[in-house]
Image (cartoon, helix red, strand yellow):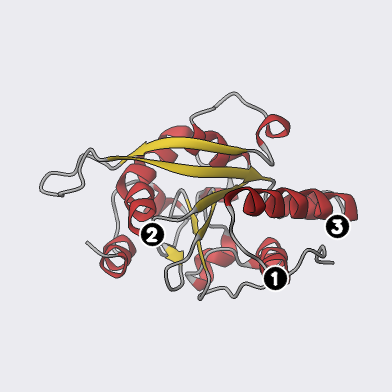
């Protein structure tokens, strides 16, 4: 199944309670043409639920500003997504079980389909989950490259079922961390340095080494 087919299937998902609790629609992902970079966050929020697109609202604007400063265009150069595809009630962090269910149904298939050169987790929930480090703090995770073996879900009849593949994964703070810290220049610089260091270490090119403002 290609990524477009997977997207259409995902849009119709009604596999768990999240689709009915607070979400008005499923928010799959935004992608480009053979993107090398995949950004993964935790779940859609209110604005994402309204638009059907990931990374909207105030934090989404900060994300867009950052990737634009790096020389990338959303919808062309990057793949941006969430572990969970439906908005949890009150924008809470999805539970581990909710992440596990949705990742096995969608995210892992998505990752294998995109086959990115680097996965960058935005926030602790996605970093802990994809790296299987549920008790590790952000200060220990961020800015480092990890090699992680992921397994394609065991879907009957799918030729990739049970396939294992190694992926490069990096972690940084979610853009909302900038907002929570009063748009602190130091926090902006921290995230910028994390992302550029991760890209440098895996050899992915970007056009600017100047921190976005």
Q: SS at mark 3?
A: loop
Query: What numbered label is drawn on residue 207?
Result: 1
Query: What numbered label is drawn on residue 114?
Result: 2
| Side of 211 relative to 35 (left or right) | right
Tag 3 residue: 183
Crowding at mark 3 (Cα within 10 Å: few <14, some 14-19, many 20+): some
For image coordinates 29% across by 68% down, the residue present is 8
For image coordinates 65% across by 64% down, the residue present is 60
| Side of 165 relative to 140 (left or right) | left
| Side of 159 relative to 49 (left or right) | left
Query: Of discs 2 and 3, which sits in the foreground?
Result: 2
Q: Position of residue 163 (x, y in %)?
A: 25, 40
- Callout 1 touching callout 3 (CB < 8 Å): no
Q: Position of residue 117 (x, y in %)?
A: 48, 54
Whole-number angstrom distance, CA of label 2 to CA of label 3: 33 Å
User: Which quadrant would the N terminus be assigned to in this image?
Assistant: bottom left
Q: Earlier in the sequence, mark 2 or mark 3?
A: 2
User: Which quadrant would the C terminus be assigned to in this image?
Assistant: bottom right
Q: Earlier in the sequence, mark 1 or mark 3?
A: 3
For the residue pair 209 and 133, the one nearer the viewer reads as 209
| Side of 70 relative to 48 (left or right) | right
- Callout 2 touching callout 3 (CB < 8 Å): no
Q: Position of residue 63 (x, y in %)?
A: 67, 63
Q: SS at mark 2?
A: helix
For the residue pair 181 and 152, the one nearer the viewer reads as 152
Quarter location, residue 4:
bottom left
């Amino acid at each position: 199944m290609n990524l477009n087919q997977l997207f259409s299937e995902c849009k119709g998902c009604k596999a768990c309670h999240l689709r009915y609790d607070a979400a008005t629609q499923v928010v799959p992902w935004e992608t480009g043409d053979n993107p090398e970079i995949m950004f993964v966050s935790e779940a859609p929020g209110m604005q994402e639920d309204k638009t059907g697109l990931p990374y909207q609202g105030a934090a989404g604007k900060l994300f867009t500003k950052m990737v634009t400063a790096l020389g990338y265009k959303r919808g062309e150069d990057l793949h941006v997504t969430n572990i969970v595809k439906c908005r949890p009630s009150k924008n809470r962090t999805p539970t581990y079980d909710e992440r596990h269910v949705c990742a096995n149904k969608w995210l892992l298939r998505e990752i294998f389909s995109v086959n990115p050169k680097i996965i960058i987790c935005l926030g602790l929930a996605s970093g802990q989950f994809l790296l299987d480090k549920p008790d590790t703090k952000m200060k220990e995770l961020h800015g480092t490259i990890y090699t992680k073996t992921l397994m394609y879900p065991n879907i009957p009849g799918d030729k990739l079922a049970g396939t294992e593949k190694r992926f490069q994964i990096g972690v940084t703070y979610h853009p909302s961390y900038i907002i929570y810290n009063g748009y602190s220049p130091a926090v902006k610089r921290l995230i910028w340095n994390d992302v550029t260091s991760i890209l440098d270490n895996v050899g992915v090119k970007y056009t600017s080494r100047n921190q976005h403002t």
